[in-house]
Image: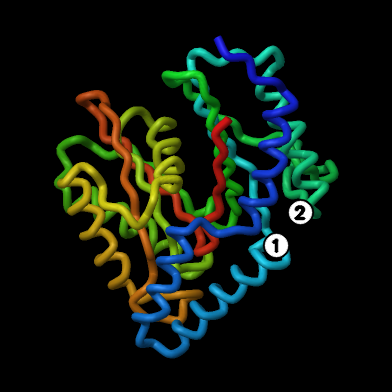
Amino acid sequence: MRIISAKIISKAVDALCLKANTELRGDVLSLLKKAKRLEKNRLAATALAAIIKNADIALKEKLAICQDTGMPVVFVEMGCNVHIKENITDIINKAVERGYASNYLRASIQKDPVFRNEKLVYSPAIIHVDIVKGNKLKITLLPKGFGSENKSKVKMLIPTLTLDEIENFIVESVKEAGAGACPPYFVGVGIGGTQDFAALMAKKALLMPFNKLNKNKKLSQMQTRLIKKINALDIGPFGLGGKNTALGLNIKTYPTHMAGMPVAVNISCHALRSASVTI
């Protein structure tokens, strides 16, 4: 059994708060640059250039890529041979609060979601923990801005629907988002499980590399079709048109009940931010 101290975890999460909010992932930045090279619409290409320049400044100056530093969503993969003597939820929430405050990231959390009469704070985060094999601890921080989170969709479809009808729901979800969530988008899709699990898979799909093919050939083909259909919407960067409404789409699936077909769509703006550390 390997013991990991609260101090080590806290320090790691603190660092992730800065990295995730100031440094775009390599796959995301690469796809933005590729889109700029291939975009023929002048206004759209100009918008993409501004997005890339903004990311470059954020990295160099250690400033937030976006003023909305999001709701911190933390994914933990804890090895079954790992022991932590303190409550990991408390450790992470305290570290997020410190990491956001010390790096001058915006406080966006309203502790009272109904009456909203409290001062905005930095925590708590949304924390998901999975138990995996081994003696390591992997922590991923996804700061989820609500301009895009508000466009999320989940629908309990009937299992007799055709593949085209399932794909139409996904495309219509992006179409309804329009230019309101800062395209070009990165889209996560979850299919199967239960209503809540499909939504979780859709968010986890945003953590998958967008520059790699899905190992499942049929899902890979489905992703390719969906990207083409979404880009045919001609929404484009910031709604300026062009062929880059979405730069990537990932699908995660899970077994489901024979009577159901849960489908969830989670959209990220162009500033898809996440960072991971393995301890």
As drawn, the label of residue 16 is: none
**SS state under label 1:** loop
Q: Quadrant of residue 248?
A: bottom left
Query: Which three-letter amino acid code belongs to the residue tagged 1?
Result: Gln
Residue 105 in the figure: left or right of residue 230: right
From the top left corner, tell me how far across and down residue 159 is, in percent: 19, 35
260 up-or-down from 222: above or below: above
Q: CA distance from mark 1 to mark 2?
A: 7 Å
Residue denoted by label 1: 67
The residue shown at (33%, 77%) is 243
Foreground of the two, 119 or 275: 275
15 up-or-down from 10: above or below: below
Categorize mark 2 by other alpha carbons within 10 Å: few (<14), some (14-19), many (20+): some
Circle nearer the N terminus (1, 2) = 1
The residue shown at (66%, 22%) is 88
Q: Is residue 258 visible?
A: yes
Residue extending furthest toward the bottom: 42
From the top left corner, tell me how far across and down residue 186 is, in percent: 42, 58
Query: Which three-letter amino acid code belongs to the residue tagged 2?
Result: Arg
The C terminus appears in which quarter of the rendering? top right
From the top left corner, tell me how far across and down residue 57 is, in percent: 66, 71
Foreground of the two, 33 or 51: 33
The residue shown at (72%, 26%) is 91
As drawn, the label of residue 106 is: 2
Q: Are marks 1 and 2 in contact (CB under 8 Å)?
A: yes
Foreground of the two, 97 or 151: 97
Residue 256 in the figure: left or right of residue 114: left
The N terminus appears in which quarter of the rendering? top right
